[in-house]
Image: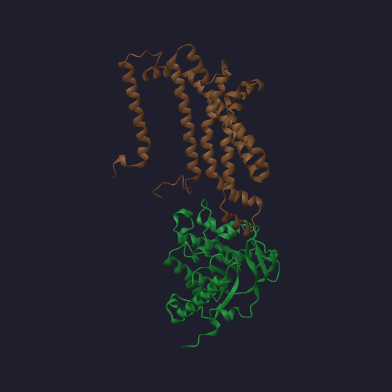
Chain colours: A green, B brown
Amino acid sequence: MLAPNDALFAGARARGAAPVVEILSADKVFPNGTRALAPIDLTIAAGEFVTLIGPSGCGKSTLLKLIANLIEPTDGRIVWWSGAFDKVGAQGRTIAFVFQDPTLMPWARVEMNVRLPLDLARMPVAQSRRRVTDALSRVGLEGFARHYPRQLSGGMKMRVSIARSLVTEPNLLLMDEPFGALDEFTRNRLDADLVRLWWDRSLTTVFVTHSIYEAVFLSTRVIVMGARPGRIRKVMAIDEPHPREESFRNSPRFAEHCRALSALLAEVSVEQTRS
Amino acid sequence: MRPLVQSESFMTIAAPLALGVIIVVIWEIACRALHIPPFLFPKPSDIAAKLMSDWPALLGALGMTLRVALQAFFAAIVIGTFIAFLFVQSRAIEMSFFPYAVLLQVTPIVAIAPLIIILVKNTQIALTVCATVVALFPIISNTTLGLRSVDPGLVNLFRMNRAGRLQTLWRLRIPSALPYFFGGLRISSGLALIGAVVAEFVAGTGGRSAGLAYEILQAGFQLDIPRMFAALFLITLAGVGLFTIMVGLSKLALGAWHESEVGADA
């Protein structure tokens, strides 16, 4: 086999890169007493594509929300770009979140939905228009700016949601099972588009999924989590060249990674039932 | 081309219209065949004749009633929306005030109308206050519900993008509340008319400010039953008119995006 060009390894790109988010012994106990997360230590470096995977109730989404500062840790802390969350929003320090559902405003046209983060930041429309057009063309929805969300299919709505997250040119993109509700063909296509976007824009991404195939296809690093309480059980690097094409799915290397990851997940779930 | 009977928009107008015509024709024929005198139960042609001959007085009365109803409707929108905004500011405000809003709703207007008419000197204003009390509640409850029915995902999105309180209100809460608000308008417009008529009945005022209810009362005293029916017809017409305007407004505001206004063909 040909030795892959090292420069194409995202792992290498991320190696030695500055941390974007550091999670320092952060845990989460909900007001009703449920311990969602045991203390977690995790650093996400610039340029990484980190996937959180694990059984239901392992706190993947909770961890993502902590990173998004949508919820506060009960103990420990989280550091963004070596500072507090106040530092987010400054030049080169923006976070975007893509939810499980497209979460679009049904009363607003596609362009207005995509423009929302810029509008909220009070950017003049004359300035934001170009960014909106650019974001829409990146997700392949050039002709749909004047449509309403109800006129779009599920996959297209998700693309609008992604365009909205790209419009701020975020340095950290958080995605909570964004394609979970879509059919497999649509999901595969969006995965391929996402990985290209991530590569082209040097995004740093944290992605939550249930799908082993999706995790292997997208990630530079997969974090396997266990439940009760949620915690990190294994970490697996997927050192494969980027940008990954659809053909990667059919390669023996892909199958090998999937087998390894699936074995790790099985191990975690066995430990789970034993404990 | 499809036959007109299969066209949805044609049928929604034509079908009830045809039924109405059939009923009127049967009514006319039955009255004639059974020789029912007009002072017991008038024929449609008697009512139509009355409408033609008495139209200046009846139209004036319709104008009075409509004026009261529209003033009350407008007041209910302003006050109701204001109260709804107050309610969503804090649970404490809502919890302390909501039972009294319900109290206002469940107390029959006929029972409080005499009190309001005694307290408020100007009859016009007294009638408007009565009708406002009746029309207020649907606006309060629907708008409050609407302002609270915001997609939690969108709330998170706005928070993530550091939206201010005012931005969240304008760009998220108000648009989310619109379908509920328009639902409230539809109910409230009809109630404002009912409130106005009921208040007029209680007040029983004659003279220059005589509304349709007064016309009905007077016609009853004089056994001028066709005129009574004519006044009744005008009230019904006004109610249907108000409702149609509200439906049109709702379509105008929500037509492009809301499920309730988007046809099955879209």
For residue B246, above or below residue A69:
above
Q: Position of residue A119 (x, y in %)?
A: 60, 56
Classify the position of the N terminus of chain B by image quarter: top left
Asked whether residue A80 is in view, the answer is: no
Q: Position of residue B97 (x, y in %)?
A: 66, 38
Q: Quadrant of residue B143?
A: top right
Residue at image position (61%, 80%) is: A15
Q: Position of residue B178 (x, y in %)?
A: 54, 44
Q: Nearer the viewer, residue A143 or A46?
A: A46
Q: Nearer the viewer, residue B191 or B66?
A: B191
For residue A11, above or below residue B20:
below
Q: Is residue B14 left or right of residue A274?
A: left
Q: Residue furthest top?
A: B222
Q: Nearer the viewer, residue B60 or B235?
A: B235
Residue at image position (62%, 74%) is: A46
Residue at image position (47%, 65%) is: A140
Q: Nearer the viewer, residue B212 or A239?
A: A239
Q: Position of residue A199 (x, y in %)?
A: 54, 74
Asked whether residue A30 is in view, the answer is: yes
Q: How many marks?
A: 0
Q: Quadrant of residue B108?
A: top right
Q: Is residue A180 left or right of residue A121?
A: left
Q: Quadrant of residue A118?
A: bottom right
